[in-house]
Amino acid sequence: MKRYKWGVLHFTILIIFLVGCSSDEQKAFFVKAEDEEINHIHGAGYWGKGGIPVLATHEGLLEYQGGAWYKTTRNNHDYMGFQPTKEGFYSSGHPESRSGLKNPLGLVESKDKGESLDKLAFYGEIDFHYLGASYETGTVYVLNEVKNSEIGPGFFYSKNKGKDWVQLQLNGLTSSSVSGFAVHPSDDNTIAIYTEQGIFLSKNYGMDFSHIQTKGPITSLAFKKDSLIYSMIEDNQTTLNEMNLNNKMVNKFTSISFENQNSPIYVNSNPQKESEMMIVTVKNDVFISENGGKEWDKILSNGETE
C-alpha cells in the first residue's frame, strides 16, 4: 500500500514538472515590458504589418503597440546594426550567453521578429556596427572594419543576402571619418553617408558621391521617398531637418527641441506611412510623431518603461 501511494505521488510530481516545462516553452515571445530600464539602444525602425516602432537593444528587442512597450522573452541577443526590411530584419551583434550560437553573429536575418535567425554570412567572424538596407529590395550595405575570410576593410553591398559582395568605390567621399549611413527604402542604388563635414549622397551604389554642405555635423539620418530627415548640431543646438532630394531645399522642424548633450542617434520614417516618424536620443529618450512632425509624443524617457 505504501509503495502504491509513493508511485502515485511520484507520477503526479512528474506530470506537474512536464506541464511546467511545456508551459515555459510555449510562453509568448513578446510580453509587456513593465519597469524595464534600457541602457543601450543599438538600432530602431518600423516593422511588421502597418509599421510598428521597434528598438534593438543590448538585451533583445522591444516593440511599441497600443501605448505600451513589449519585450522578447527569449533570443535576447545584443543586436548591432539592426535594420528592418519588408521581409523582417537584418542584424549583426552578439548572441545571449545561453543561446549556443557562435559569437559574433555575422550577418543574420529574421522573418519572424527574432524568434528564429537565418545565418547569412560571416557567422562567428564579424560584428557589423554599421549596417543598412533598402526596406523594399533587401539590398544590404555594410562598413567592414576588419578583414575577414571574404572581404577586407571598406564599404560593401550585397543584392543576394550576403552570398556575393561588391565594394563601393567612394569617389567624391572626402571625409576622413564616417558617423553613419542610410539606404533609400526603395531605390537600393541610393545611399547617404553622414559625417562631421555634412552629407555625401550617391545614386549609383556608392561609386560616386556628391557633397551636400550642412551648417554643422550630422548625428542621425534617414530617407523618405523624396527627402532626407536628419539631426544636426548647429551653434551648440540640435535641430531636426528635412531636405528635399530634388531641389535640396531644407525645412526645419520647430515642433521638437532637444536638451543639451541629448542629440538624436537614430531618426526613422515608417516606410509604409511616411507621416509616422521616430527619434531615439543619446539619453535613451524615444519620440514618435504620427502627423509628419507637427506633434511629438515621448514614449520612452531615459530608457525606462512604465
Image (spheres, rainbow, N blue to C red):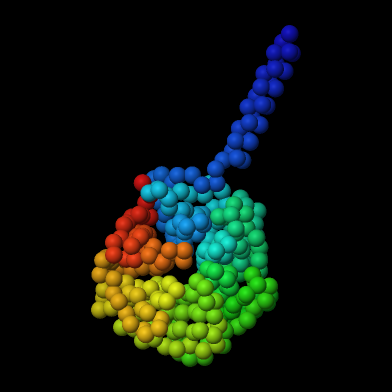
Q: Residue at x 29, y 65 (%)?
A: 294
Q: Quadrant of the N terminus?
A: top right
Q: Depth check: 265 or 63 in front?
A: 63
Residue 207 against residue 192 in the figure, above or below: below
Can residue 112 be seen from the camera position used here? yes
Q: Residue at x 55, y 83 (%)?
A: 205
Lateral position of residue 188 relative to residue 244, left or right: right
The residue most toward the top is: 1
Numbered circles on residues, count: 0
- Residue 295 point in image, percent of width and height: 29, 61
- Quarter of the image for residue 303 reads bottom left
Q: Depth check: 126 or 85 in front?
A: 85
- Quarter of the image for residue 168 reads bottom right
Lateral position of residue 275 relative to residue 234, left or right: right
Q: Residue at x 44, y 61 (%)?
A: 41
Q: Residue at x 35, y 54 (%)?
A: 299
- Residue 33 point in image, percent of width and height: 44, 46
- Residue 49 point in image, percent of width and height: 51, 56
Residue 261 against residue 304 in the figure, above or below: below
- Residue 93 point in image, percent of width and height: 56, 63
Can residue 280 be seen from the camera position used here? no
Residue 275 against residue 3 in the figure, above or below: below
